Each structure stands twice: as C-alpha cells, then as structure tokens.
Image (cartoon, helix red, strand yellow):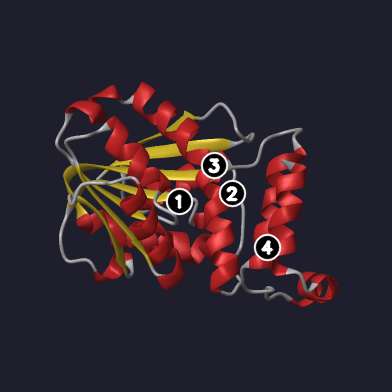
C-alpha cells in the first residue's frame, strides 16, 4: 500500500507546499483529472468490501431494494451492486462532472440496464427516499463537519427502517498504513481526516441512527470497515 499511497501524493505534486500546509492548514487541491485518478484508485476496494457486506447481510441480495451510492466515483460499487443484487434499483450521485462522465462510461461498457444510473449532484438536492444509502470513502475527504452534514441529509432520505452503510478506512493500532492514508487525505483536501472505528460509530449514533454496528473487511488495506445503522 505504501507505493500506492505515494502515487496518491504524486497526483497532486507541489511538494514544496507540504511544510506550509502542515503549519497553516489548507490543502494542495485537485483538478478534475486528479479527481478522476483518485476515484479510480479507491475503486480497488469495491470487490472485497462488497463481498464482506453481502456475506454479512445476505438478505440484501434477495430484495428489490432501492440503493443510493453517495459519492459514487467511477461506479465500481454500482456495478458490484448490480452483480450481487440484480433486481434492485441502483442510483449513484457525485458532484464532480468529470467523475460522473467516467462512471457513465463504465456503466455503458458494462452494458448496465437502465435501472442503474448516475446523476451529477449533491445528496441535499434529492427529494425521494431509498431503502439503502451507501456513503463510500467520502468522510475522509469532507472531514467531521462534512460527515455530520451528510449523515443529517441521509436520515430523512432513508425509507422507514432503511439501512445506512458508511465505508471508511479507520485507524488501526500498531499499523502505519491507515495513518499514511490519513496524511494523504490531509494534504489533498481542506478537511481531509481519518477516524477511528469508535469515532465513526459515535458520529453515526449521534446523528440519530439506531443499531449501529461494524462490518470489518479483510484486505486490500488494513482498517477498511463498514459502519451499518438503521434509520
């Protein structure tokens, strides 16, 4: 993972800014091409993460639930959902137009049916409800204030008894890999952060969700987890 993490940093370059950013705050910032790279890299977590999720919650595969993937990136999780829950309605949203274009192209290449789609926009703009809302690899970009806002926006958009799924890389005792990931996020994004599992669960519970729990993912990086909760 260390080589992969360094590749993340190489997308932003401008290394001479890092000492100042560590002292004063701020971030390097990413253009659309760099955002596209970052979302392609994070897509590598999708197969293992979705396998762990459906192994723990096999009932998801047997429903005709409606799924929303917030910050859907390249659409990797949408395609995994299509494979594992083939009768479900699947919607992805992302605010970045380049990333949305990438995701739509990936869906076309996969000959995905029309009931799986990607829209450009923010969660707060949606006016309908979903049975399952997934927020994958977003909190480490937006930090605690952004995470609280997304949790508040997701709750009224979950159908009664709906399922919230938050996927993140959390800190792990005695393993530097998640810490290095957190450093990457701090350099690339204004509010970049990494959370512990307990902090992540507390954020979700504090936002008014019920029955908060954790699903651990084995590989491809230490500390990859889902936090699950009910509306």
Quarter occupied by the C terminus:
top left
Between discs 3 and 2, the one toward the N terminus: 3
**Residue drawn at the location 55% of the way across and 49% of the way down:** 42
On the rendered structure, is 153 left or right of 223?
left
Quote the CA–CA distance across marks 1 and 3: 26 Å
Give the percent coordinates (x, y) of residue 195: 59, 49
Q: Give the residue pinned by disc 2.
A: 195
Q: Give the residue pinned by disc 1.
A: 203
Q: Residues within 10 Å of mark 3 (few under 14, many from 20)?
A: few
Q: Give the residue pinned by disc 4.
A: 186
**Residue drawn at the location 61% of the way across and 62% of the way down:** 192
Nearer mark to the viewer, of 1 and 4: 4
Give the percent coordinates (x, y) of residue 32: 54, 72
Quote the CA–CA distance across marks 4 and 2: 12 Å
161 shown above or below 147: above
Q: Residues within 10 Å of mark 4 (few under 14, many from 20)?
A: many
Q: Give the residue pinned by disc 3.
A: 44
Task: Tell me if label 2 and label 1 are in contact, CB under 8 Å.
Answer: yes
Quarter occupied by the N terminus:
top right
């Amino acid at each position: 993972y260390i080589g992969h993490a360094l590749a993340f940093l190489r997308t932003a370059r401008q290394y001479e800014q890092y000492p100042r950013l560590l002292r004063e705050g701020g971030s390097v910032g990413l253009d659309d091409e760099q955002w596209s790279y970052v979302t392609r890299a994070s897509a590598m977590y999708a197969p293992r993460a979705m396998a762990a999720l459906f192994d723990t919650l096999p009932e998801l595969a047997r429903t005709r639930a409606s799924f929303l993937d917030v910050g859907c990136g390249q659409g990797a999780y949408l395609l995994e959902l299509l494979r594992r829950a083939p009768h479900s309605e699947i919607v992805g949203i992302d605010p970045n137009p380049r990333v949305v274009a990438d995701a739509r192209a990936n869906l076309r290449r996969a000959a995905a049916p029309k009931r799986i789609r990607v829209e450009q926009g923010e969660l707060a703009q949606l006016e309908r409800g979903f049975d399952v809302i997934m927020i994958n690899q977003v909190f480490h970009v937006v930090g605690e204030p952004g995470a609280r806002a997304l949790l508040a926006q997701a709750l009224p958009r979950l159908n009664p008894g709906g399922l919230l799924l938050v996927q993140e890389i959390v800190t792990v005792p005695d393993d530097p890999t998640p810490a290095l990931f957190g450093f990457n996020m701090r350099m690339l994004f204004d509010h970049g952060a990494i959370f512990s599992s307990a902090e992540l669960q507390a954020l979700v519970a504090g936002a008014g969700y019920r029955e908060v729990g954790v699903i651990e993912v084995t590989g491809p990086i230490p500390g990859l987890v889902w936090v699950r909760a009910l509306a």
